[in-house]
Amino acid sequence: MPGERQGVASWPGAISIDACQYTISHGITPGTAILRILPQTTPPAEVGDLLLYDKFDRILIPDCKVDNLQTERDIDGFVWLLQIVDRRWKWRDLGGISGEYNQLDDHGKLRPWTIRSPTELAILCLDKMGEKNYSIDLPVGLDSKIGALASTMNPPWVGVTPTTGTNPCTVWKAEPPAIALSKLAALYGRRVIYQLKKNRILIALPGVGADLPEGSFSKVAPSMKSPETPTGVTVAGAPTIVQARLLLVPVGLDWDGSYRPINSLSYAPVRGAIKQQNLVTITGAAVEIQGLTFVVTLNGVRFSYQPAPGEDALDVATALANRINGSVSPNVSGRVTATPFASGDDGQVEITARVAGQPFGVAVEVDAGENNPIIGIKVDIVRPNGPGTTDWSQAPPPDFPGIRATDRLTLVEARDLARRSVWRCYQLANFSAEIGDPNLTYLSDYPGGRGGIPIIVNVKPLTVPGYGLLVRRQQIILLDEQVEQITPRPGDDRLFDERGIPQTLSIYDGYSRAKPAAIFGAISVFCQKYFWNGTRPQFNTRQSEQVFVDFRINKLHQVCTFEKPVFFRSASGVVAPTLILQTGINILNAETNAPEVFTAQRLLPGMKGATNFAVRTYEDVQMSIIGQYDGNENITGATILEADPLARSVYYLDGMAAQYITSEGLTIDYNGLVSIDLDGAIAQVSWEIGRDGPKTTASRNTEHDVNVPPYPARRRAEFLRPTAERAAETQRVRNLGELPGQP
């Protein structure tokens, strides 16, 4: 039967072609034909159409190009091996595409004028490749017509990411358009396929296509294509954003630049403190104390005196007091006052703290000898230190009366730190809290003019809605914005300016608007930009009201700093308000310290277990969660802003899973030439012409040519530089071995 078919190969300028082999496969890598020709005086044409034909069929391979010519020797003498690549060589060597599409603004929302659907992106690439005949199977996404609506009206999706999930963020910088197209197709599990018979480009799912045609078979070989398969596939997104309500506590700056709770500040005002007082007594007549050294150790600083001849105990007390008062040690200077006086024959030193509540330590010693028991020195506590309690209620800004100088701060420096931070800085608390009656305010809601601030009635572990308990507050990364979006109100599209231009053009400029971070709580109305306008006198706002004082967020220290002091006015004076920050946050894992991200997983068919998943990160998959709370700041639930990350992850999972599908393959050898087009299922076709006659080999869901790298390897090679790619192809030719018909 094979002898009844005689095949012929034709290439412009090739006089005598002894054998030919050509294989076409999925992908953008050009298929290669190897022609074995006898040496001739002139070289064959560099470009042209390669034609293979026999009595029953013809295979035309247009727009080919000579890629390499080698001379080799066999038993018949010298022959030329002519390497020809199909028209996909233009894709590899030529062209460049630039553009930025489906760009996201700072809130992860699409900028309308950059919107292109996957199909539109594919067409941009195909146009740059010079292709006009194509068939595209890609997921439907928002197209440029939808994006154009932003210039004429409010798009229905203003302020939120559309939920098609199929508008991939794309940046091309002079990238070869075929490579850009291949990446786009792979994103959704598709392949770029060159259909030779139709002279068409097909983008399709692998495994979906026609059966191999009937014909004169010489061999039928079933096979199974089973790539190295993980347990499943995982899509990992960008860090999740959660809109939460978080308790703030008042803090201030101290001498070392650290933020501390205001009651722990070194310069905090103290009420009810007592000045410590100790009494040192020197005993002994003038004759008896000669040659002795009297020592007083104060806060670790040693003071000593040895009396001169004729000096008595009062002289010793006076000398020690002078040395204490003249000390420059920070442990003594400015902290105590020493006063000497006589008590009978004894000399005494009264040591008194300068600052109430500031303790000091005193120790005394003298070597009086065993025969003089009445000579010596002792110390007694006249009045113990009374530390008192820190109290800011009577130290309102801006002067902060009652704050204290310290061993590291002068009064001026302490007051400067207070003005910069006290009642202005509020730090994220390390716990959650249930608030009492949120409607409590001062004066107006209480008979007799007595009232109180909404109080914390229950302290709970720090909890984030939709996530759960945290180990520490440092797991939270504060953001400047909430998850909720600002959208134009109904009717805005019917507003016109004085020129008759719709106000929509200024209301919506193509960028989404997230609500800025906000703080809620009852504060003195005099702290805000406006005064209370109610029917009754009221000194404080309600707990449920927003605080209208500008603030900024220090993410490193988790501190909100107001532009002016914010406090609650109570019957006793100025007290700390109960403030709640409502904003977006990222969350760090307590063990790994990595940001928590949205993930979607899928087990592959026939697989079990929870390990060995293939993971790929997609930055355009970001989950946004809005926490739900009741009026007492208890978490009641959580909702997602939009379904986009869910839909987007499904498409990406489809694309990843398609790489690991185990399929039943089939390879058929046909007698003679049979014109067969590639599609999603028919993955490779080879045509051979040699001394044994023409032959066609076609494979469905598998690849038969061992000299052609498998599809994953071809894709990796597509991203090599041209020199490396060419070297790889040359090596492949060398590995082809004998062509059909060679002895």
Image (spheres, grey):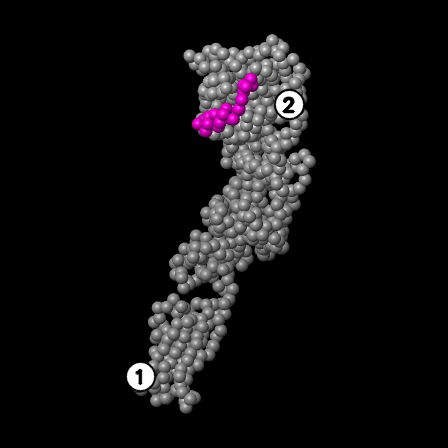
Image quarter (top left, top right, bottom left or bottom right) of the N terminus = top right
- In depth, the one of 726 and 321 nearer the eye is 726
Residue 269, above or below 372:
above
**Which segment is the magenta one?**
722-743
Residue at (50% x, 57% y) in the render: 261
Asked if residue 742 is among those painted magenta in the image, a careful observer would answer yes
Q: Amino acid at mark 2?
A: Thr
Residue at (53% x, 50% y) in the render: 474
**x then y, percent, for residue 540:** 55, 50
Give the image quarter of residue 602: top right
SS for dot 1? loop
Residue 664, above or below 592:
above
- In depth, the one of 617 and 249 nearer the eye is 617
Asked if residue 80 is among those painted magenta in the image, a careful observer would answer no
Q: Amino acid at mark 1?
A: Ala
Mark yes or no: residue 527 visible. no
Residue 308: assigned label: 1
**x then y, percent, for residue 270:** 48, 63
Give the residue pinned by disc 2. Answer: 667
- In depth, the one of 241 and 54 nearer the eye is 54
Residue at (31% x, 83% y) in the render: 308
**x then y, percent, for residue 206:** 62, 26
Is there CB contact under 8 Å for labels 1 and 2? no
Mark yes or no: residue 291 visible. yes
Dot 1 or dot 2, earlier in sequence: 1
**x then y, percent, for residue 478:** 52, 45
Image quarter (top left, top right, bottom left or bottom right) of the C terminus = top right
SS for dot 2? strand
Give the image quarter of residue 610: top right
Few, some or many residues within 10 Å of mark 2 (<14, 14–19, 20+)? many
Residue 332: assigned label: none
